[in-house]
Structures are given as C-alpha cells and as structure tokens.
Image: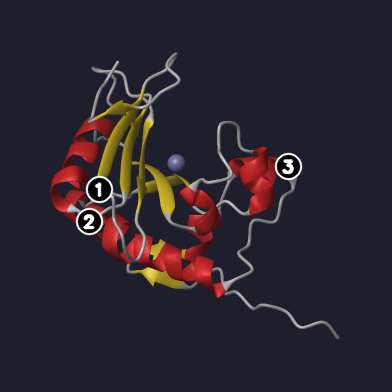
Amino acid sequence: MAKKFVVDLDMRLSKNFTLREMIRSSIAQRLGIDNTPTSFKVIEALTLLCQNVLQPIRDHFKKPVHVNSGYRGPKLNNATPGSSRRSQHRKGEAGDIEIYGVSNLKLAQWIDNNIFFDQLILEYHTAGRPNSGWVHVSIKLSGLREQVLSKLSGEKRYRKGLVTQ
Ligand SMILES: [Zn+2]
C-alpha cells in the first residue's frame, strides 16, 4: 500500500479561513486539476498568510474576504494565464483578494499601512470602479521586502506604489 499525505481540507488556518478556501480555484475545477497541497510546507505558508495578513484584514473591515486565488500547485499554476514559475502562489505565500463593498484601492492602502507583508500589488484597478481588479498580497517567514506595486492593463511593467488607471 502506498503511503499518503493526509490533508483535512476543513481545517481552520485562522479564525475565519479554512484550508479549502485557500486552495479553491475555478480554473482547477474547470480543468479537473487536483489542487490539494502535497506538503506541509505549503500549509504552513498558507497558515502564516491567514494568521498575519487575511485575518487582521477580516477583523478590521468586519466583512468576508474573498480569496480569488491562494495556493496554486504546479499544474494549476501552469494553467493560470500570466502566472510565472516564480509566483508566490506556488508556495502558498500569496493570495488574490477582494472585499465586496470596499474599494480595492482602499483595501491595498490599509494593508500597506497596517500589515507586515512581503509584496503588495494593486492589480488592474480603475479609479471610480471600487471592485475593479484585485489585491495581491504575500508574506513569508523572513526577509520581507515590503514591496508595493501596481499593475495597469496594457502595461507590461509594474509601477511603483499604489496607482490606478
Ligand atoms: Zn496573485
């Protein structure tokens, strides 16, 4: 019998976040990709992200934080347009998030001012359209870069700081 890594998808990584929602992916569902982590290292990284980034955001805004994309295993990452092999999503260090009713710019600004992070990216946000785009945020155990960037549509390079189109 082959040995198997056991994962409880309903385990809570912090008060309001389960492992299941950190690995959920519409692309994986559509393509039939199993995105369940196969190492505890990934679960540890996701736990750090939930405890130190997502939960404090949830507690401050008192609204559900929607994780559009958290962990991406190798298969899912390859199937995700625009995701690089160096993406922190691959390690469970990053989440793409939104809060309905809170502008992504406001969300990114609050994170910038209140949370320890490695990288914060305001992605494809248009001024005056609160829910346009999303916020990418990452954390790791050490060597935090506290890097703040923005991605605008039609531009290849990231801009420094929080910039809207
Ligand atoms: Zn991302």
Q: Which colouring convention does the figure follow?
A: secondary structure
Find out whether the residues at labels 2 and 1 contact each other: C-beta distance under 8 Å: yes
**In the foreground, 20 or 152:** 152
Amino acid on which disc 2 is placed:
Phe
**In the foreground, 7 or 52:** 52
Q: Nearer the viewer, mark 3 or mark 2?
A: 2
Residue marked by disc 2? 116
Q: Nearer the viewer, mark 2 or mark 1?
A: 1
Seen in the image, is 100 located left or right of residue 84?
left
Residue displayed at 63% across by 40% down: 27
User: Outermost residue, left direction?
Assistant: 113
Q: What is the x, y in percent for residue 48?
A: 36, 66
Find out whether the residues at labels 3 and 2 contact each other: C-beta distance under 8 Å: no
Seen in the image, is 84 located left or right of residue 139?
right
Amino acid on which disc 3 is placed:
Leu
Q: Earlier in the sequence, mark 3 or mark 1?
A: 3
* 157 up-or-down from 39: above or below: above
Q: What is the x, y in percent for residue 73?
A: 62, 54
* 104 up-or-down from 25: above or below: above
Q: Secondary structure at mark 1?
A: loop
Residue marked by disc 1? 146
Q: Is residue 131 visible?
A: no
Q: Earlier in the sequence, mark 3 or mark 2?
A: 3
